[in-house]
Amino acid sequence: MSSRDPQRQPVAGWLFITPMLVVLGLFLAAPIVMALWVSVSDWTGRGSPFSSEVSFVGAQHYRDLLATDGLARQDFMTSMRNTFYYVLGVVPAQTVLALTLAVIVNQRFLRGRTFFRTAFYFPSVVSSVAISLVFLFLFTGTGAVNQFLGLFGISGPNWFADSRGVLHVAGDAVGLWDASAPPSGLAGTEVLSLSLWEWLAGPSVALSAIMLQVVWTTAGTFMLMFLAALQDLPAEVDEAAMVDGANRWQRFMNVTVPHLRPTILLVITLGIIGTWQVFDQVYIMTDGGPAKTTLTPAYLSFQTAFENIDFPKGAAIAFLLFALIFVLTQLQRFLLRDRDEARQRRAERQQRRQRRHTPARPTSEVSA
Amino acid sequence: MSTTTRTAAPKTSAPAVGERDTSVKKVVVYAALIAFAIIYIYPFVVQLVTAFKTNADAVDHPLSLIPDPFSLDAWNRLLDTQFPLWFTNSFVVTIFVTVMRVLFCSMAGYALARLKFFGRDTVFLLLLAVMSVPGIVLLIPKFLVINYLGIYNSYPALILPLAVDAAGVFIMKQFFEQIPPSIEEAARIDGAGPFRTFWSVVLPMARPALITLTILSFQGSWNELGHFIIATNDSDLYTLTRGLASLTSGGLGSGNQFPITMMAGLLMTIPSAIVFIFFQRYFTQGANAGAEKG
């Protein structure tokens, strides 16, 4: 590491990153530390959380949310249940829709591809508030959606006011159970402050409407990712498969989908990270209702802190959500790790190393 | 991977051996396309049309695409609310955030890509760690610090926490790593210091990345909701997102406000739409650049 190296600019380097360090330090790192302290304290929201009157209470708030039977745990578990069904519905749906849209828009013979691509992507650049306002209107009891369903003789539900669980309704429809008199085995068994019957509710009708909206909104962004990947697919590979006599569906499943595998994994990962954080729509449209069926951890944490003025518990919920997202993404990365991808990454790393070596620079500076 | 190589990638062309785009296939694809297009465009048309309806007309004929009678009621009533103030607030905040983000992110991105200084790798690792913190988790923590600093209910509280975006730094770093170092070396040999090199040589070359970042920042701060919820509770400081969200606080679809909320949403969407239409290809790049951080 020679001091003559003209690229060595210790002072300039630190000056250049100072604004970033200040802003991220002040509004990202410091908040996390402060909130961690608050989540293990008994701060009431008045005065400084660092004053001597505020004391350490250990993991009490976390215990209230996870281990102690009570309203706090019941609400938290309700929000977890809701969001679990929400993620389970939204992530596959938006991935499939995005891929479908990308494949359609990628058809060579199509006229006006740019127009359609724009139309599908547009909701992604519009504020969630504006879209939520439109969907509130479309999904009111006498709104456009129900009038449209009425054309086919279907009388739609009063979407955002309907707390019935979709699985409860479906089970009732196929004769599995009577939703008005749930089987006592399910209704009487309590797990983590919710009865099995409640755990099995599925997303409520209200939550389903939000799910539809989110799938509709986010598919466009993911479509662009799929489109970029599709355009990287070499035509020769597809042709070779064709020569081998593979039909269109076989080619899609055996050539296109494997080629898209990394993109699919990325879309699913980003989808899971994004969906567990759902907040805006709940804040704008439902406030967690009806009957807490659109309560999500992010919204519950906000509500606990700012409406019930219980910052310690609100912060604890936020950290539990953080931990959950972190574990899920790590788990998923581990389960779906791709050998090809790893090999490719190794090759890229090697390439990068070689590129850095070319202008004779000291090797000690190379960071792999 | 560079975004430029992506756009430059040859589009698969020329129907291959034995491939015929049969008319059946065409019909199916076009049918699917039109169905999806309706699903995607119709809500915006409804929004546009309903904004010019009367309350009664909007409630009675939600499917109808012709306002009957045509009404500017919603517009007039909206002007009586704090809407114009919220619009101004949104503009002020968005402009400040965008300028600061573009400047700070490109400075940091350049330093992390090109300048060598002690601790650079550590800083970059910290940046990656910070990027993986889900934004929604930070709402309460950010409020605590804003409150502690005594800037709650002020413009600085709205603007400063958004002034740097870790993903933006990452995008700029990626970009600067692709610029050939020879040009900077030439500037240095001519006696330009790091600041001068950055300002007059590097930044002008970074135009595409700067535009992408500008658009992402504009879009991000114009549409931001969560941060503005925790940074203020004073309706004089509301931005559009926060203000409009408060318009629906009646909760579950109070049936008589729809033309107003549609008009408000429409007006809020116009700036985004203009930026989007003029800079569409940068959106595409931004979406993919953002993807690569994952």
Image (spheres, rainbow, N blue to C red):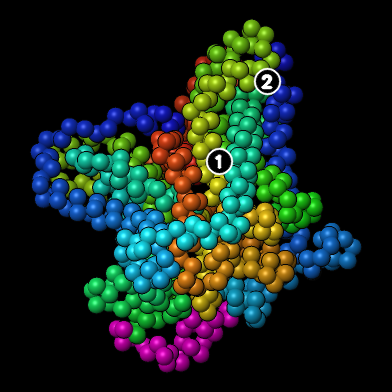
**Relative image position of residue A316 (x, y in whole percent):** 68, 65
Residue A109 to residue B47: above or below: above
Total marks shown come to 2
Residue A187 colored magenta? yes
> Is B283 left or right of A26, judged from the image as shown?
left
Q: Which mark is residue B195?
A: 2
| Image quadrant occupied by the C terminus of chain A | top right
Assess whether mark 2 and mark 1 are in contact (beta carbons under 8 angstroms): no
Residue A197 to residue A76: above or below: below
Q: Is residue A222 visible?
A: no
**Relative image position of residue B74 (x, y in whole percent):** 48, 60
Q: Which range of residues does the magenta coloring cover?
A: A173-200
Q: Residue at x 11, y 50 (%)?
A: B24
Q: Judging from the image, what secondary structure is the residue with disc 1 in?
A: helix
* Chain that bears disc 2: B
Amino acid beneath label 2: Phe
Q: Name the foreground residue: A115 vs A279.
A: A115
Q: Name the foreground residue: B79 vs B199.
A: B79
The residue singled out by tag 1 in the image is B217
> Is B76 left or right of A169, judged from the image as shown?
right
Q: Residue at x 55, y 21 (%)?
A: B204
Amino acid beneath label 1: Ser
* Chain that bears disc 1: B
- Mark 1 or mark 2, earlier in chain: 2
Q: Residue at x 64, y 7 (%)?
A: B190
